[in-house]
Image (cartoon, rainbow, N blue to C red):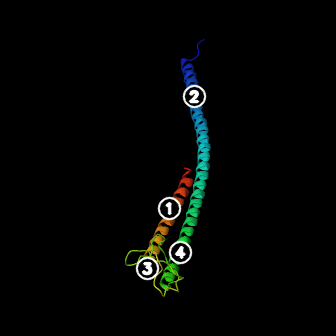
Amino acid sequence: MIPNPWILLALVVGWLASLVGVGYWQRTDGRQVERSAWEQRESAELRSANATITALEEDARKKEGDHAAAVAVISTNYEEQLKNANDRAKADRAAVRAGSLRLYDPSAAGLRACGSIVGQTGTATAGRDGPAPGELSPEASGFLLDLENESDAIVKQLGAAQEVIRADRATCGMN
């Protein structure tokens, strides 16, 4: 005897519905498992990247702080050298004005009006007999001292600039 075809049809439809339900469940479960694995992998990579970024930022901050300290030392040294040079220049100008500092031209010899060299007969007495042979005027001495101080200031400035460039290159790793 053949059972009722409607029952068989209902059983087949039920069985197909069961297969579809299990397939759907497995597919969504597999998607969730895959997504979970992907999220965990991405999360681990993100944590690693964040740790690397933090380490690099700290390293950059340290380099920046070291560079700022090096430039501050260079600036302090330059300012101190400049102050010392200005103090020395003031002292030199005062000494030239007071007459205690005299500059001489070692290659100049005193000439008489007729063109022959003046002989030194004795020691000069504190400038009362006029300037010694080859002695520069106070104005010329002051000019030369100012010129020397300006050139020394330029040398110090260029030296400080070179030190800053070296510090920059050390910071950038271009030694």
Tell me how far mark 4 sits from mark 2, CA to CA: 88 Å
Tell which of 99 and 131 is nearer to you.
131
Vertical relation: 62 (above or below) 124: above
Tell me how far mark 4 sits from mark 3, CA to CA: 27 Å
First along the sequence among labels 4 and 3: 4
Q: Secondary structure at mark 1?
A: helix
Q: Secondary structure at mark 4?
A: helix
- Identify the amino acid type marked 3: Ser
- Identify the amino acid type marked 4: Lys
| Labelled pair 4, 1 in contact (Cβ < 8 Å) | no
First along the sequence among labels 4 and 2: 2
Q: Nearer the viewer, mark 3 or mark 1?
A: 3
Q: Which mark is residue 161?
A: 1
- Identify the amino acid type marked 2: Gly
| Labelled pair 4, 2 in contact (Cβ < 8 Å) | no
First along the sequence among labels 2 and 1: 2
Q: Secondary structure at mark 2?
A: helix
First along the sequence among labels 3 and 1: 3
- Tell me: 43 left or right of 153: right
| Residue bearing the label numbered 3 | 137
Give the residue displayed 47% in from the left and 72% down from the top.
105
Say few, some or many: other residues with alpha carbon within 10 Å of mark 3 (under 14 / 14 to 19 / 20 or more).
some
| Residue bearing the label numbered 2 | 23
